Image (cartoon, rainbow, N blue to C red):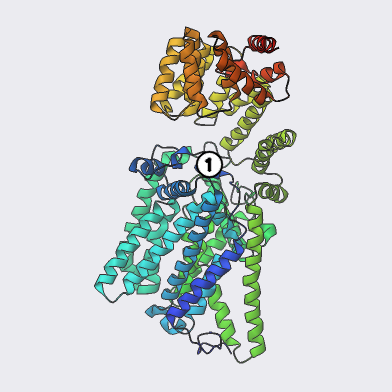
Amino acid sequence: MLTKENGFTLPLRCKFPDAGKYAFTILSLFIALIIIYSNSFQGDWHFDDFANIVLNPHIQITSLSFSEIKQSFTGIYQDRLLRPFSYLSFALNYYCGGMNVFGFHVVNFIIHYLAAVFLFLFIHNTLKLPILREKYSLIEYPVALLASLLWALNPVHVTSITYIVQRMSSMAGLFYIMSMYFYLKARTSEMTGFSIFFFVACTAAGIAAMLTKENAAMLPVSIFLFDLFLIQGVTKDNLIKSGKILILPLLMIAILGLVYTGGFSNILDGYAGRDFTLTQRLFTEPRVILFYLSLLFYPIGSRLSFLYDIEISRSLLQPWTTLPAILIIFIIICFSFYIAKKRPLVSFCIIFFFINHFIEGSFIPLELIYEHRNYIPSMLLFVPISEFIIFAIDYFSYKKMVQLIVALGVMIIIFGLGDITHRRNEIVSNEFLLWMDNIKKYPLLSRPHTNIGLFYLEREQKEKGLYHFQKAIELNHFSNAYVRDIQVQNLGVYYFHQGNYDLSQHYLEKAAQNIKPDLTNRLFVARIKLLKYEYSQAYDLIEPLLIKYPDDHILNETFCLILLKENKIKEAEIYAKKFLKRNISCTFPLKILAEVEKKKGNIRSAILYWKLYRNSFPIDPYVNLALIELYYDLNMAGELDEELAKLFCLKKTMILNIYINELSRNPNLLVYVPDVYKIRKIVNARQRMIQ
């Protein structure tokens, strides 16, 4: 029989001391999590993964030098510190394993697992506090274990673990709960030395949390309320005494908020491109938070999605659920404070959920809803539920059958959560399944159509890609003007690759209105100008960008090409050499210098540059054709024959004219343009000589 007296332990001969209980918890959490996340380790890159990791050169470090580590700290914008610990972790992942998704997923899994372990340690030790000891002394272990399991297995957290970039949420959560655990140990340690050690650890973990993601700024408030509710106790004297101290964490949050946002005016500016105002966001978020609660307690697969279509609250009465949602949250919070003296644990766990939604669920102009925002707020949400379940098992201790039914129900819930999470991982791990699932659940959203369109285009299924791009524009249900213009830009890029340059330019210029920086737009428009022989206009588009992005390789390459096409030979040579000096591993300037030397009549120098280029690209067809022309000009018969032999290997069974014409498409975007008549003449002449 499971009762308080036997600590709800199984009737085994071996009794677990605390060390054994911890070992059992650590092992059981690992086994449960590795099973349900086993299908996530080869999951695709998604959504913001590309901008933050795949296409972010600043985290793609090749050494552990201070300069490269420092570079990773400033994220994708390179203008300020931005979640430096998150980006550093991505950089270290890249350093160890490149862009292999397996390594990134393993780290994400370990972070979540450690967060679950520290959550258990925090809850277990909290239930041993003097203010709670009498009530929970016999059940602290099963309550802590069950609460940790219910949190760790919850399907809502899949996007925090399987969606690679949301390591930002899970790692912040790990440091957050570590900081609270160390604070608890510091406050309860009987030895001064240990107290100092744990206070230092608490501070270090707290700083790490805030440097991982900004929502961890609520940590000082959480620690303050934890101390008040569960260590000091909620009394009139303690409230007065603590009220004077509360200003410190609030001031810290205000300072961090101002630093991060750049001031209140910047916050308001952030709403300029949104589909909702500050007031509308404040009215909508209570409905979102109640929806989060419903998801956490009823997380079936049909309700889970990557992107959600949430109706914006235009006023307190539109939709009608807005005012009730605000009142319900107000009542819940008031009730939590009301029961704080008699039920401090339940009170604190409820308040913890709401205060940790404050940053992402209030005035900051973020997207309205994302599942990963529940990672920290939900950490203690299942403690009252677990307490109720354990007390229910104890209450029915005199009825073995009823007790077994309750225990069986708990097991079914745990296995059910694991099954849903495992199934959800199958969807979130696969790019195609993720967006098709999102379209099925929220067919009126534009962004899933945008992303499935990109998926099709990358696989050369252009008609399907174009259909979803146009569908996204037709629905016109984006989260903000920036996202809408990104889709317009995608159409511009699509039509560029289709050769419809007028339509491409139309979409690109239309998209440039809200996309800042508009680097991609200008690059593609500049290429269109090159194709139309409008060299000076292409120059005017690219030259100002070089001041802002002097190290961007594509930008520098495009500028070199413009100078060459304008026949500014000297300028092209000088710029290509400067570019090569700054980036010794770059090969593009070698092609520019080869063509410059050819135009100057220095054939041998041109050959030398093409050979240097060939060291990196040994079967490049342009090198082959360029050297054929140059060797012919110098009458280097032996070398010419070698290149002609390579030509026949490269073109295989293609007719020579067709082969060269295929390579010569869009000549104004090529550094070297093959002379089809000259090469055909050379080939024919050598064949006649052989005959």
Quadrant of the image containing the N terminus: bottom right
Q: Position of residue 397 (x, y in %)?
A: 59, 89
In the image shown, does 425 or 614 lie closer to the viewer?
Answer: 614
Mark 1: give few (<14), some (14-19) or many (20+) Cα within 10 Å: some
Compared with 435, 184 (above or below) is below
Residue 246 in view:
no
Which residue occupies the foreground of this view, 217 or 242?
217
Residue farthest to the left, as pictured: 192
Residue 340 visible in rendering: yes
Q: Is residue 428 above or below residue 61?
A: below
Q: Residue lying at the far bottom in this picture: please name it.
A: 398
- Residue to which mark 1 is pinned: 54
Query: Residue drawn 73% across and 24% down?
Result: 653
In the rendered image, the vertical position of residue 423 relative to residue 619, given as above or below: below
Q: Amino acid at mark 1?
A: Val
Q: Where residue 118 sits in the image (x, y, percent)?
A: 44, 67
